[in-house]
Structures are given as structure tokens and as C-alpha cells.
Image (cartoon, grey):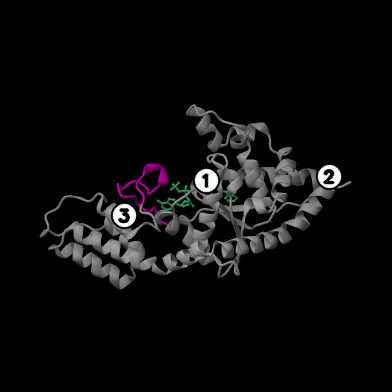
Amino acid sequence: MRLLTGIQPSGDLHIGNYFGSIKQMVDAQNDSETFAFIANYHAMTSVNDGQRLAELTMQSATDFLALGIDEQKSTFWVQSDVKEVLELYWILSSFAPMGLLERAHSYKDKTARGFATNHSLFSYPVLMAADILLFSPDIVPVGKDQIQHVEIARDIAIKFNNHYGDILKIPEFKVEENVATVPGTDGQKMSKSYGNTVNIFGEEKHQLKTIKKIVTENVAMEEPKQYEECNVYNMAKLFLNEIELIDLQDRYTRGGEGHGHFKLYLADVMWEYFRDFREKRAYYNKNQNEVREILKMGADKAREQALPMVEIIRSVTGIKY
Ligand code: ADP
Ligand code: TRP
């Protein structure tokens, strides 16, 4: 089974990103063939500062390696290091009807909100189709917001195949339904855009400050407390084993402790949980050349996969003459 996913290099990762997406990918490395890349061309639709994009790309690569992407088990690269994707992007453009792209939410929403849009935002799904179809994955794991993009990739592949034969593999998307939405400090879905995140790699003091801001119900210290709906509990449970979880539930129902105690506990277990990841990150941050080497090796591995497909496509389309 081959899995492929792209991740935009968009800054500080939070625990919603980790439990909702990164951990699934890391776990999948053990029983699937995994392809993961940093979608830096896609990020150009929102980051126009060159130095910042370059930094974000390196920091994302560093963070993903620290969090367990294993370059031996996975093929891990930066999108722009396999330029063949841009060639396929152009070729596929001829099989991407205007109407299909006009219906894409990513473009429609921004236009509706009055943003000045440009061609890269409009053709974003075609580049994403090229990312996918170049590597013939069986499955593309995505968040709900990306389902439509995978459907567009499928439509484009079917159109292409109708013209040139059964060449592109039609991908399936997979949404991890049983991964609960991680709540943010205000109880809404944790998201960068809501400013309610608890980041994975924050400073210890800053992290504690953020955790102290988590919204909780107002109950006197000695009273028993509900844990099911408590934001602190719902974050803490991500880090606990069964015995620790039951113990925490007891502490809630017993009374005698305030939410402040549970917040301190959350800060502690979270700090402990990410300790090894933090150390690995510090190592890679100090050894950025090693990260560059890993990315280069990943790009070579990815290109090896992509080239035979590009050759066939050049040949059937007549680009190879
Ligand atoms: P953000 O909402 O912070 O901008 P992204 O949209 O970049 O996050 O999400 C990247 C990945 O992390 C996606 O696969 C998404 O499903 C997952 N993710 C983001 N926030 C959460 C959350 N609160 N709970 C579970 N998964 C999440
Ligand atoms: N558009 C995806 C996102 O914003 C990132 C992405 C780019 C991607 N190319 C991809 C995801 C290919 C899966 C497959 O999250």
C-alpha cells in the first residue's frame, strides 16, 4: 500500500497537527510505503517573503524529522527539489476544465471574501494533482478540507487516461474519522487561524502560560468536577495511558483540586511526552547540513520513482519527439 501526503510549511506546529496528522503518518511508516513532501510551491500562494519561505521550509523539515519521519522508512523531500512535478502540472492543465477549478473551495472562498486572487491560487489543485499522480499512490490521507482537491486529481487523471490510455493511477483519499478534533485553549477546534494553539516546541515558560489560559468551568476547589467536557482533560488524555487516564478521572470526580492543578499536570505530561522529540529537534537545528543531506537523498529517491512515469507521459503526449 502506498501513501502520499504533502504538508505546507506553515510555521509552528501545534498538538492538533501532531495528533490529527503527523502521528498518523509516522505510525504508517511501519506498515506502508510512505511518501511525504514539504509543499513549498503551494506555500507561495500565502508566503511572499523569500527569506521567510526558505526558513519555513527548513524548519518544517527539521520539525518533521524530529517528530519521527524516518528518512530510511519514508521518502521525504521538498516539492521544489523534484521539478518534474512542474512539467506534469502543465501537461495536466490541459485536462483540468475551467468549471472544475472554479468550483474549488480554496479559490471560491477567497474570491467570495474579496481577496485579490491570482492564477496560482486558481491552479493550486492542478499542481496538487501533479504531486499525487506523479507517484501513483493508492491512498492520500487528508484533512476534510482537502477532499475536494483529491477529487479534482481523480477527475483530471480520468480525463487524461481517456485520451492516452490507462497510465495514471486513480488515487483514493482517506480521512481519519476516528481521530478526534483536538480542542484549543478556548474550546474551539485548535487551529493557527483561531490563535488558540498549544505549540509542540514552545519554550517551557511560554507553554505553561498558554496552558494556564485554557478555558475551564468555574467550580469551587473542594467540589467534584466533570472531566468529559473539560478542555484541560481533553488535551491531557492525548498524552496518557489507560491507568494514568483513570487516575486523572478520579482526581476530577473526587474534588479537592482545582483546574489550576490539572493545568500544571497537563503542562508536565506534555513537556515529558515531547522530551525526546525536543532533543532530536535541537540536534537537527544544530546540524542543518545533515537535514539538507537527508532532503537531498529524499529528492533523489523521489525522482527515481517519478522519472519512469514522466518518460511515459512525455512519450504518449508527444512532448518527447
Ligand atoms: P491549522 O488549522 O492550524 O492551520 P492545518 O490546516 O495546517 O492546521 O492542518 C494540518 C493538519 O493537522 C491537517 O491534517 C489537519 O487535519 C490536522 N489538524 C489541524 N488542527 C487539528 C485539530 N485541532 N485536531 C485534529 N487535527 C488537526
Ligand atoms: N494542499 C495540501 C494542504 O494544504 C498540501 C498538499 C499539496 C498536498 N500537495 C499535496 C496534500 C498532495 C496531499 C497530496 O494541506
Q: How crowded is mark 1: few (under 14 residues within 10 Å), some or many (20 or more)?
A: few
Q: Decide: marks 2, 1 in contact (CB < 8 A)?
A: no
SS assignment for the magenta stretch, majority: loop
Residue placed most toward the observer, 264 or 278? 278
Q: In what element is the residue under mark 2?
A: loop
Residue 34 seen from this side = no
Marker disc for residue 319 = 2
Q: In the rendered structure, which disc, 1 or 3, sits on the residue that comes first in sequence? A: 1
Task: State the residue lying farthest toward the right.
Answer: 321
- Which residue is the site of mark 3? 206
Q: Where is residue 295 in the image (x, y as percent from the top left)?
A: 61, 60
Q: In what element is the residue under mark 1?
A: helix
Residue 43 drawn above or below residue 267:
above
Q: At x 47% / y 50%, what residue is drawn?
A: 11
Q: In the rendered structure, which disc, 3 or 2, sits on the residue that comes first in sequence? A: 3
Q: The N terminus is located in which quarter?
A: bottom right
Q: In the rendered structure, which disc, 2 or 1, sits on the residue that comes first in sequence? A: 1
Residue 233 falls left or right of residue 94: left
Task: State the residue lying farthest toward the top.
Answer: 114
Q: At x 43% / y 59%, what residue is drawn?
A: 19
Residue interval drawn in magenta: 179-197
Residue 207 falls left or right of residue 287: left
Q: Position of residue 41 (x, y in %)?
A: 61, 45
Q: Does the residue labelled 3 lie within 8 Å of ligand 1?
A: no
Marker disc for residue 251 = none
